[in-house]
Amino acid sequence: MASAAEQLASNLNFATFAKAEELKKRIWFTLGAMLVYRLGTYIPLPGINPQAFAQAFNQQSGGVLGMFNMFAGGAVQRMAIFALGIMPYISASIIMQLMTSVIPSLEALKKEGEQGRKIINQYTRYGTVLLAIVQSYGIAVGLESGNGIVNDPGLFFQISTVISLTGGTMFLMWLGEQVTARGIGNGVSLIIMAGIIAGMPRALSATLEMGRTGALSTGVILGIIVLSIVVVALIVFFERAQRRLLIQYPKRQVGNRMFQGDTSHLPLKLNTSGVIPPIFASSLLLLPATLAGFSNTTSLPGWANTVLAALGHGQPLYMIFYGAMIAFFTFFYTAIVFNPKETADQLKKHSGFIPGYRPGDRTADYIDYVLTRITVVGAIYLVAVCLLPEYLIAATGVPFYLGGTSLLIVVSVTLDTVAQIQGHLIAHQYEGLIKKSKLRGGKRGR
C-alpha cells in the first residue's frame, strides 16, 4: 500500500503549485539571488589590462584555471570580483569536516546539536576568510608577474585585489546561506551550478563552430551529444539509487494501550561522497601543470618536463591517476561524512534494530559492511562518468563544460532542488487537507 506521502506526491499538479504562495516567493528569491551572482561575475577588478590578461589566460585555460573558471561562471576569464567564487568556502567546509573527525573537541562540539553546528559554521566562515585572503594575495602576485597585465603594480594593487576578491567570496557565502534559508535548494550548490550552466551555451556554440570549420566531424559532434545524454541518464539513475536497510521498532505500551512495532528503512546512497571526489582529483592533477605554466619551463630539469608532459590533460598517465584519485576520495570522503558507529548508536537510542543483528557494535559493523560494498559501485560509477567525457575532451578539444564533473554537478543539484520543490508542494497540500478536515469537523459539531 502506498504511503500518505506517495499518495500526495501523485496528486501534485500545476494547480497545487499555483496555490503555493510561499514556494513561489522562495523560487523568486532564488532566481533574484542567481541574477545578482551573475551580474557580479562581470564587474572587473580595478587596475587590470583586459587584453593582456585575456592573452595570458588563454595560454593557461587548459589547466586548473580553466576548471576554476568553469566553477566561477567565467569570472576568472574576466578577472571579476567573484573570480575566487565559492571555492574557498567549500574548501573550508571540507577542512572542518576532516578536523571534526580527527579532533575530539570538535567531534564533541558536533554532537551538541544545533548550538554546536552554529559554532562549527562560524569556524568555517573564519577559515573561508583566511583561505580567500591567501588565494587572493597569490592571484595579485601572479597578476603582477605577468607581462603588462597590471597597469600600476605595487602594494596598493595587492591590497585592493585582496579586499575585492575576499569581499566577493564572503558576499557569495552570505548569498548562498540566504538562498538556503529563504530560497529553495542548497545555495552554495546552486551558485556553482549557475556558473556552469552560464558557460554551457558558449561551450556548445564553440563545439558547433569547430564542426563548421572542419575541426570536428559531424559524427563526432553527434557522438558528443549522445554521450552527454547517456552520462546524464547514468547520473540520474545512480544518484537516486539507494540500499535500504530494514529497521524494526519493538512493541510499546502507552498507558493501557499496546502499540504494534513499526518498521522503517535506513537509506544508504550509492554515491555518499557526491561531487567532491572529481573536484579534488581534478584540482590536484591540474595544479602542477598550471604552476609550471607560470614559470619558465626551460629552467626546469629534464625529468620534471617529462613528468609534466605525462601528466598533461588527456594523457594516459593523467587518466590513470585521475581515476585512481576519484576512487580514493570516494572512499575517503564517505568515511568522513557517514559514521556507522553514530548511526548504530542513534538506532539503539530509539530502540530500533536491524533484524538478525544485535544493537551496538554488531549493527555498526553490518552498516559499515554494506556501505563499503555499495561505495565500490559508487566509485566505479564516478570513475566511468568522469573518465569517458574526459577522454572525449582530450581527443576532440571540446570545452570543460561538457565534461563529466560539470554534468555531475548540474544533474545532482537539479535533482536535489526538484526534490525540495516537491517536498514544499507536498507540505502545502498536506496543510490544505488538514484545514479542510478541520472545517468539516467544525460544521458537523454545529
Image (tube, helix red, strand yellow):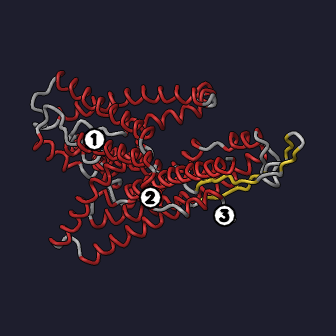
The secondary structure type at the circle numbered 2 is helix
Q: Nearer the viewer, residue 122 or 136?
A: 122
The secondary structure type at the circle numbered 3 is loop
Per the rendering, the mark at residue 320 is 2
Residue 316: x and y, percent? 38, 61
- Give the amino acid type for the residue marked by disc 2 in the picture: Ile
Return the residue at label 3: 2
Q: For mark 2, does the 10 Å Cα neighbourhood hold few (<14), some (14 to 19), or many (20 or more) residues?
A: few
Q: Disc 3 versus disc 2: distance between alpha carbons?
A: 46 Å
Q: Is residue 302 visible?
A: no
Q: Disc 1 versus disc 2: distance between alpha carbons?
A: 40 Å
Residue at figure coordinates x 36%, y 64% from the top left: 391
- First of labels 3, 1 by sequence position: 3
Residue 255: x and y, percent? 87, 39
The secondary structure type at the circle numbered 1 is helix
Residue 205 sits in which quadrant? bottom left
Q: Check the image and report above or below for 218 versus 81.
A: below
User: Of tags 1 and 2, which is closer to the observer?
Assistant: 1
Residue at figure coordinates x 70%, y 50% from the top left: 367
- First of labels 1, 2 by sequence position: 1
Left or right: 118 in relation to 300? right
Location of the N terminus (image quadrant): bottom right
Q: Nearer the viewer, residue 386 or 324?
A: 386
Q: Check the image and report above or below for 197 versus 169.
A: below
Judged from this view, the residue extending furthest toward the right is 256
Return the residue at label 1: 36
Q: Is residue 140 visible?
A: yes
Q: Nearer the viewer, residue 365 or 247?
A: 247
Q: For mark 3, does the 10 Å Cα neighbourhood hold few (<14), some (14 to 19), or many (20 or more) residues?
A: few
Judged from this view, the residue extending furthest toward the top is 155
